[in-house]
Image (spheres, rainbow, N blue to C red):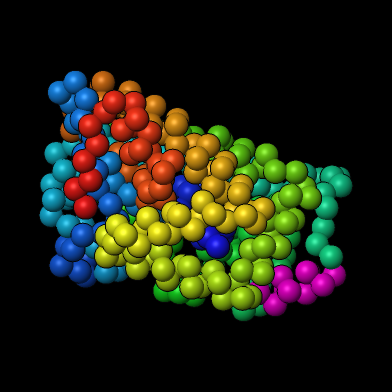
Amino acid sequence: MLRQIIVMFCSLLALLLSPVAAHAENSGTRHGALFKIEQSGRSLYLFGTIHVGAADFYPLEPQLAQLLEQAPVLALEIDPLGDQQALAKVVQRYGMQGRGGNAPVLSASWRLRLERLLREYHIEANSVAAMKPWLLASVLTISEFSNQGYSTALAVDAYLSQQAHKRGQKVLELESAESQMALFDSMGGAQQLIFLQEAIAGIESREQASQARAIGDAWRHADAAALEELASKAEQDDSYSGRFVQKVLLEGRNPALADGMQRLMQQADNAVAAVGILHLVGQYSVPELLRKRGLKVERLY
């Protein structure tokens, strides 16, 4: 199951980073997935990102690097270099427990399991005590990715944003931090506890570690078959968090992302849009939506 792994590839979590420049250590091999979208004589290039990273992800391969350098606009789900104060307010509103509330709490047995993971990840319990369960589950997921050798500081979307700002390019946001976090907070308290419990269980069983390696490797090698297989497994995941991620965070957001890309094509030719890779694979993906709308969709890799 991919319930918590997919969460990592929603840009919500990338928003919580403090990005730093990536170190160039690879030879520019292909990563992720790249599509060319065409309509009415205009083109858009659509790149699949991952919201964590590793040093060997960079530099980006020459074809993509050239497209990025020449693009009049870079469109991201959310710009990680956006207004940090505004972001902090959104996190406070949707991710932190309100004072005097009657939020459900973990049972004693689940609390012990959580505390063991916090110790393993060297996280002070007091630092996460006020987090809502969905946000705490996200923190655990980030920590497990770090254990597998992936760094949030090297996140691909953060790297793209840094390079675009350095070049003086326009960076367009296809979504907002508030809309994304509101989706997580749309879960009731009891459902958020299930979301957190499934995250804990997934880490304990090593299922999450296995899936982290699988999707990281698939992205690293631009392995289209492996990415489609991961998407198929995600669509079949019948856990609570698996259904929430697939139906709300992926399928629920894809139509609006496709709308934004079509608007962008009307405004600029040869722009680049970069969104989480799991929005670009599977039968309900953004490329499939655009194809059904009559646009020409070509997968370059």
Residue depicted at 60% across the width and 65% down the height: 140
- Can residue 129 be seen here? yes
- Residue sitting nearer the eye, 91 or 74: 74
Identify the main secondary structure in magenta.
helix
Where is residue 255 shown, x and y percent of the image? 44, 31
Image position of 144 with respect to 105: above or below? below
Quarter of the image where one finds residue 185: top right
- Can residue 153 be seen here? no
Image position of 16 with respect to 289: above or below? below
Quarter of the image where one finds residue 59: bottom left
- Highlighted range, magenta: 108-117
- Residue sitting nearer the eye, 229 or 76: 229
Q: Is residue 112 left or right of residue 205?
A: right
Where is residue 241 shown, x and y percent of the image? 63, 54
Residue depicted at 36% across the width and 46% down the height: 280
The reply to whether the magenta stretch includes residue 78 is no
Residue depicted at 53% across the width and 37% down the height: 252
